[in-house]
Amino acid sequence: MSTENNQLTIWIRNMKTSREAFEALYNEMSRPMYTVACRILKNRADAEDIVQDVFLKLLKRDDGEAIDNARAYILQTVRNEALMLLRKRSKEELRGEIPEDVPDGETEAENAENRTAVLGALSALEPTERDIFTLHVNGELGFEEIAGMLGMSLSAVYRRYRKAIKKLRSRIGGNL
């Protein structure tokens, strides 16, 4: 475990009782957390909310729970929260909430049909394939970043991404 990781783990353990530990953790991790959330969500306000939510989760977590790699744990939590928000919003749109930027009824119907097809195809992927695809396409993360976040080798990430693309093409057709 690196010195930086040891320090992060200590700050997480002590942040409930020490304002200094909380501030140190915030100063060290808020920018990388925001960057990950912003890359996935493409919305600054939502990214700020995710960072806030993750810090609250860290404050509420059980102190007895061991963390092997604190930085990866925190960034993975940010990633998970951001992806959950994207999924929640996708479901809301499919339930009939009309997005503000739809130009006409015909385009709206086409968009809804396309969204339904894409979401159906994405739901058919294995969870890891779906995460890799979403992080790369929606989150605009590089494969090396994704490999680090998921604790996978770079070649495994490439393989799963190619497999996801192949599955999506077979289900949706067209050019992915």
Image (cartoon, helix red, strand yellow):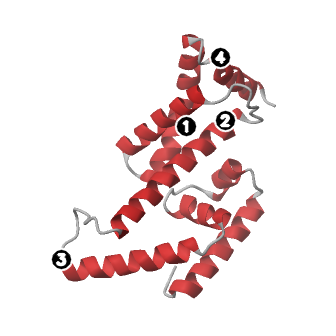
Disc 4 to disc 1, C-alpha distance:
21 Å
Mark 1 is surrounded, within 10 Å at the Cα level, by few (under 14), some (14 to 19) or many (20 or more) other residues, namely some
The residue drawn where x is 45% and y is 52% is 85
Residue placed most toward the observer, 131 or 156: 131
Q: Which residue is mark 1?
A: 32
- Residue 75 is situated, as x and y percent measured from the top left of the image, at 60, 41
| Residue 41 against residue 120 in the figure, above or below | above
User: Closer to the N terminus: mark 3 or mark 1?
Assistant: 1
Look at the picture and state if 17 lies above or below 143. above
40 relative position to 113: left or right: right
For the residues labelled 3 and 2, the Cα–Cα distance comes to: 45 Å
Q: How packed is label 2: few (under 14 Cα within 10 Å), some, or many (20 or more)?
A: many
Q: Disc 3 designates what residue?
A: 104
N-term-proximal mark, 3 vs 2:
2
Amino acid on which the number 3 mark rests in the picture: Asp
Which sits earlier in the primary sequence, circle 4 or circle 3?
Answer: 4
Q: Residue at x 70, y 54 (%)?
A: 147
- Whole-angstrom CA distance, mark 4 to mark 3, is 54 Å
The quarter of the picture where the N terminus appears is top right
Q: Earlier in the sequence, mark 4 or mark 2?
A: 4
Viewer-nearest of labels 4 and 1?
Answer: 4
Of marks 4 and 1, which one's residue comes earlier in the chain? 4
Q: Badge 3, how many Cα within 10 Å: few under 14, some, many 20+?
A: few
**Residue ID for mark 4:** 14
Look at the picture and state if 94 lies above or below 82: below
Pointers 1 and 2 in contact (C-beta within 8 Å): yes
Classify mark 2: helix, strand or loop: helix
Extreme residue toward the right, this view: 1
